[in-house]
Image (cartoon, grey):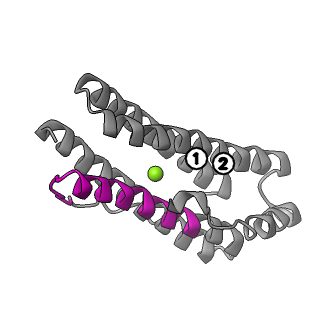
Amino acid sequence: MKNNVQFAINDQIQAEFESAYLYLAMAGYVESLNLSGFGHWLRLQWQEETMHATKLLDFLLKRGGKVELKAIAAPPASFGTPLQVFEAVLQHEQHITQRIHKLYSLAVSEKDFALQTLMHWYIDEQVEEEDNASQIIEKLKLIGGSGPSLYLLDVELKNRQPEAEAAK
Ligand code: MG
């Protein structure tokens, strides 16, 4: 594996762990507002991001690359209204999508075919991530983001199941 490819993968591992840390911070925040369904959704997101990071780590190891974990920045402790929380989720996922596309471009320019195949999974996953966040934003806008409707949305989000597909 080329050094610049290895560096970029390690960089993306950091970005995925940073995502995980951000969503765990958000889970803690919304749970402090008694929104346990939102908290459940964000905790599942935290777990998914950890899986995204370890999937890259496993790939590095299989290819004989070197794992070099980097420091993770501290996330904020407060995120505003539930709508603002999910707008921040979407914004963050859009940022991650750009990073994934950049990593794919590198895999193409370096003719790293195995990384290209792996990146197809991440590219598809980002479509889902952005769609999931957008759907919750639309629902929050629809209900005005507070009152009994917010409680009902909280109950709905509590039903989110872990993604079986993600573990593969
Ligand atoms: Mg991710």
Q: CA distance from mark 2 to mark 1?
A: 5 Å
Give the dominant element type of the magenta stretch: helix, strand or loop: helix
Q: Outermost residue, left direction?
A: 3
Asked if residue 40 is positioned above or below residue 94 in the image, the reply reads below
Tag of residue 121: none
Q: Do the numbered discs 2 and 1 sit on residues whose CB atoms are within 8 Å?
A: yes
Mark 1 neighbour density, 10 Å: few (under 14) some (14–19) many (20 or more): some
- Looking at the rendered structure, the kind of residue marked 2 is Asn
- Residue 48, given in percent of the width and then of the height, sits at 51, 61
Q: Residue at x 29, y 31 (%)?
A: 107
Q: Nearer the viewer, residue 32 or 100?
A: 100
State left or right for residue 29 relative to residue 15: right
Q: Amino acid at mark 1?
A: Glu
What x and y, as percent, mark residue 3?
Answer: 11, 40
Quick check: 31 above or below 110? below
Q: In this rendering, would 148 be left or right of 46?
A: right
Residue 1 at x, y percent in the picture: 16, 42
Q: Is residue 99 magenta?
A: no
Q: Which range of residues does the magenta coloring cover?
A: 43-69
Quadrant housing residue 162: bottom right
Q: Which residue is mark 1?
A: 129
Residue 79 is at least partly visible in this image = no
Q: Which residue shows up at 25% across the image and 56% down it?
A: 62
- Residue for point 14% across, 38% down: 2
Residue 132 is labelled as 2
In terms of image quadrants, where is residue 95? top left
Helix, strand or loop at mark 2: helix
Residue 160: in sight, yes or no? yes
Q: For this view, does 102 lie left or right of residue 25?
A: left
Mark 1, ligand 1, within 8 Å: the answer is: yes
Q: Check residue 65 for magenta coloring.
A: yes
Residue closer to the observer: 83 or 13? 13
